[in-house]
Image (tube, coloured by chain):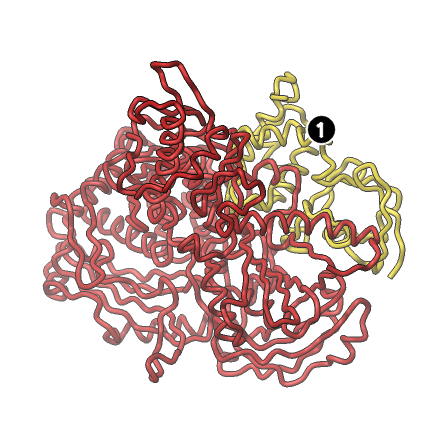
Chain colours: A yellow, B red
Amino acid sequence: MSKYTLHVNGKTQAVDVEPDTPLLWALRDTLGLVGTKYGCGLGQCGACTVHIDGAPARSCLTPVSGVGKQKITTIEGLDPKGRHPLQQAWQELDVPQCGYCQAGQIMSACALLKQHPKPSDAQIDAAMAGNLCRCATYTRIRAGIHRAAEIASTGKGKR
Amino acid sequence: MSQAPLSPSRRRFLQGSAFLLAMSAEGVLAASTGAAAGSADFVPNAFIRIARDGRVTLVSKQPEIGQGIKTSLPMVIAEELDVDWRQVSVVQGDLNPAYGSQGAGGSTSTPTNYEDFRKLGATVRAMLVQAASQAWGVPAAECRTEAGSVLHAASRRKLGYGALAQAAAKLPVPAADQVALKDPSQFKLLGTRIGGVDNAAIVTGKPLFGIDVQLPGMLYAVYVKCPVFGGKVVSANLDAVRALPGVKDAFVIEGTGNLNGLCPGVAIVASSTWNALRARRELQVEWDEGEGRDHSWAGFTAQARAAARQPGETVLRRDGDVAKALAGAAKTVEAAYSYPFISHASMEPQNCTAWFKPDGSLELWAPTQNPAAGQALVSSTLGIAKEKISLHIIRSGGGFGRRLSSDFILEAAAIAQKTQAPVKLTWTREDDLQHDHFRPGGFHFLRGGVDARGRAIAWHNHFVTFANRVERDGKSVLQPGSGGALSGDEFPGRWIENCHLERTPIECRVPMGPWRAPGSCVFAWVFHSFIDELAHAGGRDPLEFRLELLGDKDVVPGTGERAQPYSVARMRKVLLTAAEKAGWGKKTFPRGQGQGIAFHFSHRGYVAQVAEVTVSRDGKLKVDKVVVATDIGAQIVNLSGAENQVEGSVVDGLSTLMFPELNIEKGRVVQSNFHEYQLLRMPDTPAKIEIHFVKTEYPVTGLGEPALPPLAPAVCNAIFAATGKRVRELPLSKTDLSWS
């Protein structure tokens, strides 16, 4: 076991874990931040997506020992009030079914919107292809991203 | 609770556990009529609590697995109770006999509970009206309700339900049959789009799922089973594993002989999930692989072909004279269809948290679809009295029928018995894919014939299915897997005058279980594809051929004890609706594009679909549009939830058609994770899914399953129309769709 200092959602957190511990499990088991999900452990499903210095990363493939001073953002830290345009759009359009994949979907979508504030369907397909949804809410995820882009650009989301 | 000093991680655990304790305390609302938090609350039954401030708390008794039942059934209560949905909180109920049956499967939650829940709401509304009328000294008939208040128009008085709570609590509960229900034309909530009650928690990453459970002092376990189904542990390097970082214990569990029950394996219990997974990599087990070690899909396929050359073991239906009809047919078609075993692959892998306490009681936190079955299986297998087993129903990250099985609950309980702490058992994705209770594979050997007018006159199917050997009434019998039986009444059996259906089981050790629309999910593909083959052989339009096949009787009765009548009238209506909305027969398509049509009746729902596809010259499929017409009775409960279920079923149907391949070699599943076992992703989602709900005056029923079966045949029929290529084997990747 080794001690690491992680920067998570704007706070400094100390964890004492094996160096090869994936960030996913340090977040979930050690820090109690269970919004980031385990789906495959192989980087194939996207449920574990977090942001590392603003870029999307599969936390199941990121060893804690490699993170260093980089800033980690999880779904819990996406917005202090939970009112990010994506979070608003997801509720407005009733996107989730079981909901298990949705934190990862939102984190990937957030990264997409930073690159392309008004993404086309083709850009959405490319950016979101790494996030599986077994309930198959893909049509709503796509609509949610378009709606979030609208909310963000007009600032017309509900308070 | 222990008095250990609060380290930061322990504090975090308690925050999490406070959430869970809150969930479970609210879950037993039922037990506390009057003694609940706030004795001024009105708690007339196990499901409803009205507080003095007017806030309404409703208990959802059914497991929520993504089908939306935690939102839709409380909406039914809220509608008849006549409250503003914004005043309502919903809490998940635990397993509790006060709630009645709590299994969520077969799309039964809505049809089983709809009318009862209406009565629950209406009964309490009547009591509130009674309380107001007494307070005002006016006849109850002069009062009405609106959005959580009782009003008396003549005297312009109004009292909120909260203000009436205390008085209403003193009144006797009227009999359910004495209470007036709303006329559906007056519904304000039902049929509108309401967002899921847990959506805010989902999008902000709150603890919600079984895998998120956290308890003080909790340990983490993995359970390693033989890759060959039912294999036993001969020896394992337990001492070496126990010495690894964070490992608390490692031990063998013998299990029972039941493939669907507690399988033998090695448990590793550790201080964190990762420490358990790390230790697992060092685990070495010598297995006695048992009978199944030489089984393979290739072997099964050869067995099926051999079986098809003989008469079937069981005759499911024999009408008319199929041999004669085929001999005299103008055109005959012969085809072999097959599909593999597949896993459920819910995004949340199987898991369960269990705490076996010093007093011999067991507390479970389970993402389950059938909590009572889980409790019963644990009780009978481990010899713990049911009264000593409590079960908290936790939200599931997908069910699809997988969580109707209770093997993972049983494993967690067995591990907990040997662990002096709460323990969370988590299955890896590899465990989840390779130790599923699989959708059975199957082989259909079909021959059909049409007459000179192109009318279907003969249908012969030798269905080869998979079965496990089980003990029943002291005898050893072969039991087909869930959905693997095939009823003799299945469409089109009852409709074709010369029909011979026979079935032969292949014995296997593969554990099987219900997979979304069991049986139907594959039979609809086989039969509606073959019906299409017959239509084309007869030179007929596929829609007209199907309308003729359905015939002109409104209802076709079922056969035998479990006879299920088939409403041709309802099916004709959805079929014509889908065809009309899709412009069937009105569009011309270039080569490489086309439409296909199919319908299916399952789980009380009638659904027809038209798919429109483009197949590129090199054989890549794109589903451009799916038009769905659905008849699930007189009322849609939550319109948003219903649309979500239809969209999800269509895309799930497409995913299952296109991708998942599961091979068995040397008795074990070959595919281990999503890089090998593929599911549909965003780029392959149909561009447009158009949904039409056809309302008919029939009982309200559910939508978890019925919209799935017609998708695969509609798409495959469209592929044929576009390319002339017929798909007879799943997944789609096994057929070359390229054309020139």
Residue B621 seen in the figure: no
The residue that disc 1 covers is A114
Residue at the spot x=76%, y=64% of the render?
A: B271
Residue visible at 31% across and 75% down in the picture: B307
Find residue B692 and report its image quarter.
top left
Camera-side residue: B198 or B586? B198
Type of the residue with mark 1: Lys
Number of disc labels: 1
B179 vs B38, left or right, is left
Q: Position of residue B340 (x, y in %)?
A: 44, 62
User: Local crowd at mark 1 within 10 Å, few (<14), some, or many (≥20)?
Assistant: few
- Position of A87 with respect to B687 (left or right) is right
User: In the picture provided, is A68 more to the left or to the right than B414?
Assistant: right
Looking at the rendered structure, the secondary structure element under dot 1 is helix
How far from the left and from the top, in percent, is residue B250? 71, 75
Residue drawn at the location 62% of the way across and 47% of the way down: B22
Left or right: B341 as drawn, with respect to A62: left
- Which quadrant of the figure contains the N terminus of chain A? bottom right
Q: Is residue B702 visible?
A: yes
Q: Chain of mark 1?
A: A
Query: Residue A132 location in percent, x, y?
Result: 58, 46
Q: Nearer the viewer, residue B699 or B380?
A: B380
Q: Is residue B195 above or below residue B238?
A: above
Q: Quadrant of residue B167?
A: top left
Image quadrant occupied by the C terminus of chain A:
top right
Q: Position of residue B679 (x, y in %)?
A: 53, 50
Please tell me whether residue B347 is drawn above or below residue B250 in the rendered image: above
The residue lying at 27 percent from left, 74 percent from top is B309
